[in-house]
Amino acid sequence: MTGSLPRMAHEIRTFGDPVLKSEAAPITDIDGRLVRLVDEMFDTLETSNGGIALAAPQIGIQKQIFVWDLDDGREVIFNPVIAESDGEWVYDEGCLSIPGLYVEMIRPRRVLLRGIDLDGNEVEREADDLEARMYQHELDHLHGVLMFDRMTPEQRSEALAEYRRLSAPEPERRGFRRLPLR
């Protein structure tokens, strides 16, 4: 028997959980517990329903960490910041913490992300389109910002109504609707 504990996937917190509206604390020390948490975040992401990224607050951990799994493979960043951004891109955005809802959102098309990697090195990532959007979305989670907070009042009202419909017991739900940008 080894001394290590089994890894586990965490439950993804959903809209209405106050942890999603709180500011996450910066990472000050990369140790074995943090490495284990990163592994568990990847386990959670793998068991999610098609997610490409996950921020620690989405599993109830108030730390500035997010993980992602795109074409380049699995990656993690601590204490991320968007150093630069430009352009504009409208795209249907979804969120593991607001399951089933996809809303047209406007965000910068290109970003420069800075943070710290698992080895404690400062890193920069230039990204555009989906990757840039993913960084912005996950960074929002670290600051207690959800998609609803980025919407116009009319769009937010419609999106909340649709989310309530999607969250209702099965007989009350009828399919999936894409909400346009207003």
Image (spheres, rainbow, N blue to C red):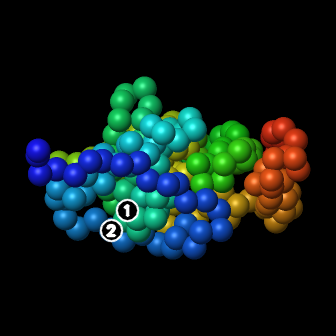
Mark 2 packing: few (<14 Cα in 10 Å), some, or many (20+)? some
Disc 1 element: loop
Relative to residue 141, is residue 35 drawn left or right? left
Q: Residue at x 22, y 52 (%)?
A: 5
28 or 88: nearer the viewer: 28
Q: Position of residue 11 (x, y in %)?
A: 49, 55
Q: Position of residue 120 (x, y in %)?
A: 18, 53
Q: Position of residue 16 (x, y in %)?
A: 65, 68
Q: CA distance from mark 2 to mark 1?
A: 5 Å
Q: Residue at x 36, y 71 (%)?
A: 25
Q: Is residue 167 above or below residue 100?
A: below
Q: Residue at x 45, y 37 (%)?
A: 46
Q: Residue at x 56, y 35 (%)?
A: 50
Relative to residue 137, is residue 32 drawn left or right? left
Question: Would residue 149 be seen by someone viewing this image from the given angle?
Answer: yes
Going from N to C along the chain, the mark reached first, 2 or 1, is: 2
Hey, what amino acid is under mark 2?
Pro
Q: In the image, which disc is placed on residue 64?
A: 1
Hey, what amino acid is under mark 1?
Gln
Relative to residue 89, is residue 173 drawn left or right? right
Relative to residue 44, is residue 97 drawn left or right? right
